[in-house]
Amino acid sequence: MRTSSLIACITFVILCSSPASGQLSSTFYDKTCPKALSTVKAAVKAAIAKEKRMGASLVRLHFHDCFVNGCDGSILLDDSANITGEKTAGPNANSARGFNVIDTIKTQVESVCSGIVSCADILTIAARDSVVELGGQTWTVQLGRRDARAASLSGANSKIPSPASSLSALITAFSNQGLSTKDMVALSGAHTIGQTRCTTFRTHIYNETNINTAFATSVKAKCPRTGGDNNLSPLDVQTPVAFDNNYYKNLRVQKGLLHSDQELFNGGSTNSLVTSYATNQNTFFRGFATAMVNMANIKPLTGTRGEVRKNCRKPN
């Protein structure tokens, strides 16, 4: 072999195997765990059949995981003598849910291929399958993430956008993760499913004016001025368990439940994107799929970094 060819081959091996390369692959488990994706899909389908809301909860877990030091499964770690987890952070406490479903999925995946599929990848696959199960478009998930051995309570408190965020704060929070404004508006469309607690939208329905009066009145029945903090209301009152573009249609008539939702259509730079997604569901679906792939690629642990947890709640 000529010296130049040998150098090229060595360079190729180094680049492709480097833990720092961050390369994910749609075929990552094809040989090592060919039943991985079908196993996750069946478990997600069963969980949503039992409780429709779970689909939104699984999508949210993936989002809250990725925004804290990347998509590394850190949100799943329980508190221990050595770890302060993210579950008690403001955006997650009494709010993040679906951990038991992830436990079930992990157990089932371990039964078909032990120690191969990471918890971080399970979150990624489960989010996609949840969207599809509730009527959304599928997309190809990129896989090969490994799991963190630590969590960041401070990161969860500071990096996950608040429901009280302004448009500029939302744009900045997503930009800090390498995501565009278009990604941000598309990912916000996940609020077409799921429910949220009274404490997250009370200020918007009682103290702000950029909200449909009749809509605000109807929601106040579930969310009194005082008390009832944990009372739930659908983020999309039209079709709360269907993944569609009604979220954007609601924003155009000032029926966004959260302050941060309505900020996307409040005379600012994102009005046109909201209109585009409201008028063409397929455009939204394509934008959402692209944005989910982009989000799922935030600082993944690959190669020899991190580990593949056997129990998603604790390091090996």
Image (tube, rainbow, N blue to C red):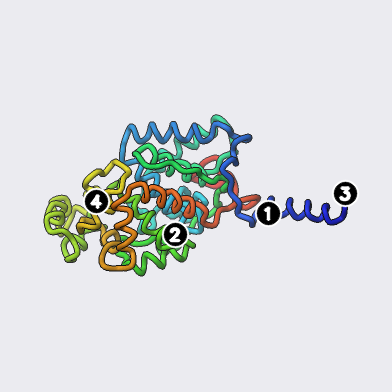
How many angstroms separate mark 2 from mark 1 (CA)?
A: 29 Å
> What residue lies at 17% left-to-right and 66% top-to-bottom?
209
Mark sitting earlier along the chain (3/2): 3
Task: Report crowding for label 2: few under 14, some 14 to 19, many 20 or more residues within 10 A (C-alpha).
Answer: some
Mark sitting earlier along the chain (4/1): 1
How many angstroms separate mark 3 from mark 2 (CA)?
A: 53 Å
Task: Report crowding for label 3: few under 14, some 14 to 19, many 20 or more residues within 10 A (C-alpha).
Answer: few
Task: Identify the residue under disc 1.
Answer: 18
Q: What residue type is labelled 1?
A: Ser
Report the mark closest to the observer, 3 or 2: 3
Q: Position of residue 55 (x, y in %)?
A: 36, 41
Identify the disc placed on residue 161.
Answer: none
Task: Identify the residue under disc 4.
Answer: 230
Mark sitting earlier along the chain (3/1): 3
Please tell me whether mark 1 sits on a helix, a strand or a loop: loop
Identify the disc placed on residue 1.
Answer: 3
Please tell me whether mark 2 sits on a helix, a strand or a loop: helix
